[in-house]
């Protein structure tokens, strides 16, 4: 059984494998240039452990040293070196906050980053192709896997017992789909 610890999402940019998309800057906070960050996975606290982040906006990336991170209710307050005025912070609204894989604790043998499964082919417990994992949505309690099939969309909680196995080399995600799980027609 795969363990789905709270791991950050990763950008869809396949060439950027050393960073993981943690979340987005929603707005500035206070007069000293702090930034409010909403995590892609509401349960993830990985931002609290890093000393640097990469901000990506409009195709540009820039590395920043972290001065301080505080978790408050649903968001993080992030203070960065060089961002010390509200006017500067305002320019970062909507920017991606990426964290470096090497700065995170190592994964256990049965763990994986949910984001690494983005784009994977998804199969049910009988080996039947369900579709492709196109994104991971935050519903504030458990991240949801958004799987697009030939003519329907399926939302599955990103946790056991729904996730059965991750085959990294084949980029295959094996899932259990309850009989009564609703599916949304596409088109």
Image: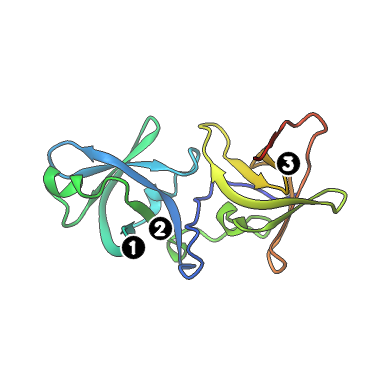
The image quadrant that residue 93 belongs to is top left
Q: Are marks 1 and 2 in contact (CB under 8 Å)?
A: no
Decide if residue 52 is in sight here.
Answer: no
Q: CA distance from mark 2 to mark 3?
A: 27 Å
SS at badge 3: loop
Q: In the rendered view, does 47 fall on the left or right side of 43?
A: left
Q: Are marks 2 and 3 in contact (CB under 8 Å)?
A: no
Q: According to the image, label 1 marks what residue? A: 59
* Among numbered discs 1 and 3, the one appearing first in the sequence: 1
Residue located 26% across and 39% down the image? 27
Q: According to the image, label 2 marks what residue? A: 99
Residue 61 placed where, x, y %? 31, 64
Q: Residue 139: give its label.
A: none
Mark 1 or mark 3: which is in front? 1
Q: In terms of depth relative to the viewer, which is nearer, 145 or 148?
A: 148
SS at badge 2: strand
Counting other residues with Cα less than 10 Å from the Cα at mark 2, is it few (<14), some (14-19), or many (20 or more)? many
Mark 1 or mark 2: which is in front? 1
Q: CA distance from mark 1 to mark 2?
A: 17 Å
SS at badge 1: loop
Residue 48 placed where, x, y %? 38, 47
Q: According to the image, label 3 marks what residue? A: 162
Q: Are marks 1 and 3 in contact (CB under 8 Å)?
A: no
Q: In the rendered view, does 125 fall on the left or right side of 69?
A: right
Work out whether 34 lies above or below 112: above
Residue 185 placed where, x, y %? 69, 36
* Among numbered discs 2 and 3, the one appearing first in the sequence: 2
Q: Which corner quadrant holds the C terminus?
A: top right
The image quadrant that residue 35 belongs to is top left
Counting other residues with Cα less than 10 Å from the Cα at mark 1, is it few (<14), some (14-19), or many (20 or more)? few
Residue located 49% across and 56% down the image? 10
Residue located 39% across and 49% down the image? 47
């Amino acid at each position: 059984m795969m363990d789905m610890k709270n791991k950050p999402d990763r950008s869809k940019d396949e060439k950027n494998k050393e960073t993981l998309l943690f979340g987005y800057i929603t707005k500035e906070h206070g007069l000293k240039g702090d930034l409010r960050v909403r995590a892609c996975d509401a349960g993830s606290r990985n931002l609290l452990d890093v000393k640097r982040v990469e901000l990506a906006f409009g195709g540009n990336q820039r590395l920043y040293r972290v001065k301080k991170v505080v978790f408050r209710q649903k968001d993080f307050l992030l203070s960065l070196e060089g961002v010390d005025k509200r006017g500067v912070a305002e320019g970062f609204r909507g920017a991606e906050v990426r964290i470096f894989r090497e700065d995170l604790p190592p994964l256990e043998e049965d763990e994986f980053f949910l984001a690494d499964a983005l784009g994977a082919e998804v199969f049910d417990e009988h080996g039947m192709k369900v579709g492709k994992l196109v994104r991971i949505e935050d519903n504030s309690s458990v991240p949801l896997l958004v799987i697009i099939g030939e003519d329907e969309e399926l939302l599955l909680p990103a946790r056991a017992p729904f996730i059965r196995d991750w085959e990294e080399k084949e980029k295959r995600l094996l899932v259990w789909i309850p009989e009564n799980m609703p599916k949304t027609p596409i088109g």
